[in-house]
Image (tube, rainbow, N blue to C red):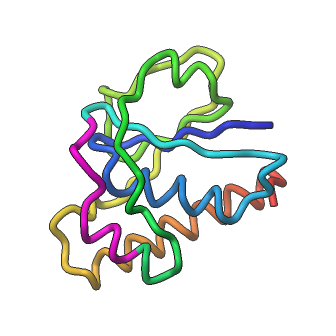
Amino acid sequence: MKTVIFACVHNAGRSQMAAAFFNALSAPEKARAISAGTQPGERVHPEVQAAMGEVGIDLAGAKPRLLTDELAAQAEMLITMGCGEACPHVPGIRRDDWPLQDPKGQPIERVREIRGEVRERVQALIEAEGWR
């Protein structure tokens, strides 16, 4: 089983959406995703919870957590979303950066657009890696 980590600064928006979509769309016996942040927030942003709820994904129980070197070392791939230099560099791990806008404080219409961008990128990753 492969593990992908989706990381952003507060682990309260983009990375939560990406991990949730990944785990909903990928074959669980092939790959799983976890999300983390370099400066975890208190909770998932309410606008993100609302937008994900619209597509049947409940993030009410999701809790932001710290991205540590140890956590990153468990993964085959680290996908960052705006944490820049604060994201750890782990030798031997594949890394990609997805330049996605932070949904925090955005109107729900924009959060929906970001949600769509995240889902498209996650679907493309799953297809490219054969994790469906």
Q: How many marks?
A: 0
**In this rendering, is residue 116 above or below 1?**
below
Residue 128 place in picture, x, y as percent: 77, 56
Horizontal side of 71 relative to 82 (left or right) equals: right
Kindly give the residue lying farthest to the front in the view shown: 61
Rendered position, 86 above or below 7: above
Q: Tell me where residue 77 sits by quadrant.
A: top right
Left or right of 115 in this view: 106:
left
The answer to whether residue 35 is left or right of residue 48 is right
Q: Quadrant of the C terminus?
A: bottom right
Residue at image coords 37%, 35% = 65
Q: Which residues are magenta?
A: 40-51
Residue 103 location, x and y as percent?
27, 64
Residue placed at 42% from the left, 38% from the top?
Answer: 36
Looking at this rendering, what residue extends furthest in the left direction? 105
Quick one: quadrant of the N terminus? top right
Q: Nearer the viewer, residue 118 or 23?
A: 23
- Residue 115, how many percent across, how many down? 43, 71
- Magenta stretch contains residue 48: yes
Residue 123 locus on image (x, y percent): 66, 65
Residue plotted at (65% across, 18% down): 92
Q: Nearer the viewer, residue 96 or 39?
A: 39
Query: Which residue is depicted at the point 43% across and 50% down?
Result: 15
